[in-house]
Image (cartoon, rainbow, N blue to C red):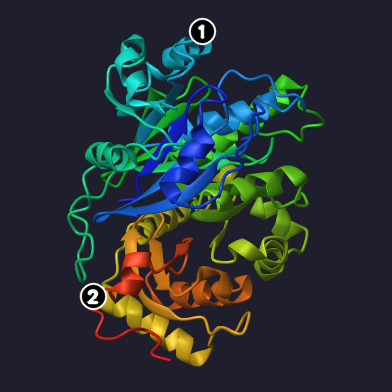
Amino acid sequence: MAVPKVAIVGRPNVGKSSLFNWMAKKMIAIVDGTAGTTRDRMRHLMHEGDRYFEIIDTGGMGIVDSDDLTDDIENQIELGLAEADLLVFVVDGKDGVVPLDRHVAERLRPIDKPKLLVINKCDSTKLDDTIAEFFALANCDVVTTSVKGNRNRDLLLEKILEQLPPADEHEGAEGAELEEEPELKLAIVGRRNVGKSTFINALANEDRVIVSEVAGTTRDSIDLRIDVDGKTIIAIDTPGVRKKKSLANDIEFYGLVRAQRSIRRADVVLMLFDSQETISRVDKQLIEEIIANYKPCIFVVNKWDEAVNAGMTMEGWGNYLLNEFASIRHAPIAFITAKEKRNIKKVINLAQHIFKQSRERVGTGLLNRVVRAAVEKNRPPMRKNKIPKIYYATQVGTQPPTIVLKVNDPVLFDNSWKRYLLGVLQTELPFTEVPIKLYMRPKTEEEQRYPAQLPEGVEEPVDNI
């Protein structure tokens, strides 16, 4: 399973970013009294007890941004709500319930996900006796906190752990396999007139394929449930994205939003290109969204019959895509003619293959042997007169494969060396065509005082220097 995600939500100025930094024990999000300081989602990987989870700081709900970025902020909030496994609803204990709190409560109420109400800024225990009015906002557990007074951080984390999805029973098991393969959710995205509808129609009319329309999880998408050779695929049909000249054009803006939501919901993304058109800004925006969300992706070049007639080659188009999108060079490339249903089935088989890759889990012993070999072949360079050291590696999640390296100091590892290591991991592990999420975590103060026992399967530290 993927690493669980916990979204911190609420109106502006209730202390969401302060709470985020307090939980993380480091200054990550900007804290300011000005409403709207947080615009993008901030993330941090937490490790509490035997669980890993991500906390996500979101912008204030209901704000009108001074720089005319309200739509962008709202989009980021919606994405945070969509991806979260647990919603932490934060209110201000000093202010009491205000109308905007009720607005947030109404927005969260239809979302069928676990929730936790955090009454923040309760710097004095006296405020604990005045919080009853908040209980009507949400039917869930309640925690009073104070970042300033350092109150109830452990209780907050305890309540979060209680409501996380159950831990993967196979976590850390050597060579463990997943018992049941779920339905594959397949997003078909691309700019207008690239052939998405033709592709879906071709897929729906394949031999041995049964199609039925079901309501999408959002009001702006339609899911097609397709049975291919006894396996169910959910094809997410998304309208084409046009180049947006300005955010004032609602149709163009929400076309991009729909595509972003489809990408986030998907297990695998089919990024369609027209063989007769050059790569556009819209294509690059969609690829950026795919990369940002660590989604397995297949580049699908459509209308290949026309390309052949024009003298184009697969090698030429492949090099073109590689030059334009070097950061996603692991993505496989397929060439189709959707109008003639040519190679459609091969694309689906490839999507199922990389979906399986994204759900793989490797044993800790194998992972550390691969990391050790990578370090021995190319040691990370010294920085600030210090030697970067890796003590051990462990996989903590799937979809995407998520790997944590315990190191002496994450700052010592430069981006070029991390790219090198990711390349090795993708080559040597069963993740050749899917993105890997890599975290580097320093030893905690307790681990520095009392050296931690190595995980099962790790005979010695990766780097003994």
Mark 2 = which residue?
453
Q: Is residue 83 visible?
A: yes
291 or 118, nearer to the observer: 118
Q: Quadrant of residue 198?
A: top right
Disc 2 crowd rating (10 Å Cα; few below 14, some 14-19, many 20+) is few
Identify residue for label 1: 99
In the image, residue 53 sits, relative to residue 99, either above or below, namely below
| Kind of element beneath mark 1 | helix
Q: In this view of the protein, can residue 202 be seen by the observer?
A: no
x, y percent for residue 160: 29, 38
**Residue at mark 1 to residue at mark 2: CA–CA distance:** 51 Å
How crowded is the residue under tag 1: few (<14 C-alpha within 10 Å), some, or many (20+)? few
Q: Identify the element where label 2 is drawn.
A: loop
Q: Which mark is residue 297?
A: none
Residue 2 horizontal/vertical position (percent): 35, 50
The answer to whether 137 appears left or right of 187 in the picture is left
Q: Residue at x 24, y 85 (%)?
A: 459
**Residue 124 at x, y = what percent?**
38, 26
